[in-house]
Image (cartoon, helix red, strand yellow):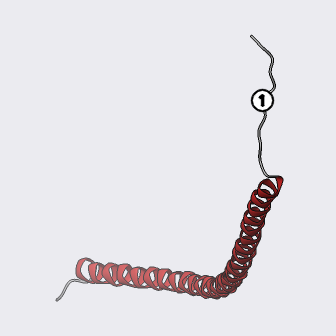
Amino acid sequence: MSNTPIQITTDLSQVLEQINQQLKSLQKEVTDFRTETKVATESIKGEINTLRGEVNTLREEVKGEINTLKVEVSHIKEDVKEIKGSQKAQIWSLIVLAFTAVIGLLGTVAKILVFPNP
């Protein structure tokens, strides 16, 4: 085998022109990528701000509902107190009524047995 060098004849200006064209193409791709990234970033920022607004709105709604529930619970507590008081009064009324009925029944039985009709 012989070691003869291979010679390539190319015009250097053509090679440089091709390199310049590829660099311009690469620069355009980088610029396009930056533009797309900036647009995407702005879009994401807008969506984040929208979500923050929605979260704040929901937070306020939940706070309002919690306050409403607190008021309702306090009303329920008051109603339960009233019902307990009312039940006590009803129980005492039933006890008095039952006692009166028993006394009346005993009086009637005594009248029949002890004091018969002449």
Please state the horizontal and vertical placement of residue 81, each as a whole percent of the image.
Answer: 60, 83
Q: In the image, 116: left or right of 49?
A: left
Residue extending farthest top: 1
Q: As rendered, which of 91 and 62 lies closer to the eye? A: 62
Horizontal placement of 5 versus 53: left or right?
A: right
Q: Residue at x 74, y 79 (%)?
A: 42
Q: Residue at x 78, y 53 (%)?
A: 15
Q: Secondary structure at mark 1?
A: loop
Task: Give the quadrant of residue 45.
Answer: bottom right
| Residue occupying the point 69% across, 86% down | 60
The picture places residue 84, in percent across and down from the top left corner, at 56, 81
Q: Looking at the picture, tell me which residue is in the foreground, 88 or 83.
A: 83
Amino acid type of the residue tagged 1 in the rendering: Ile
Quarter of the view holding residue 17 = bottom right
Residue nearer the viewer, 65 or 34? 34
Q: Which residue is mark 1?
A: 6
Question: Taking 6 as reference, is 12 above or below it?
Answer: below
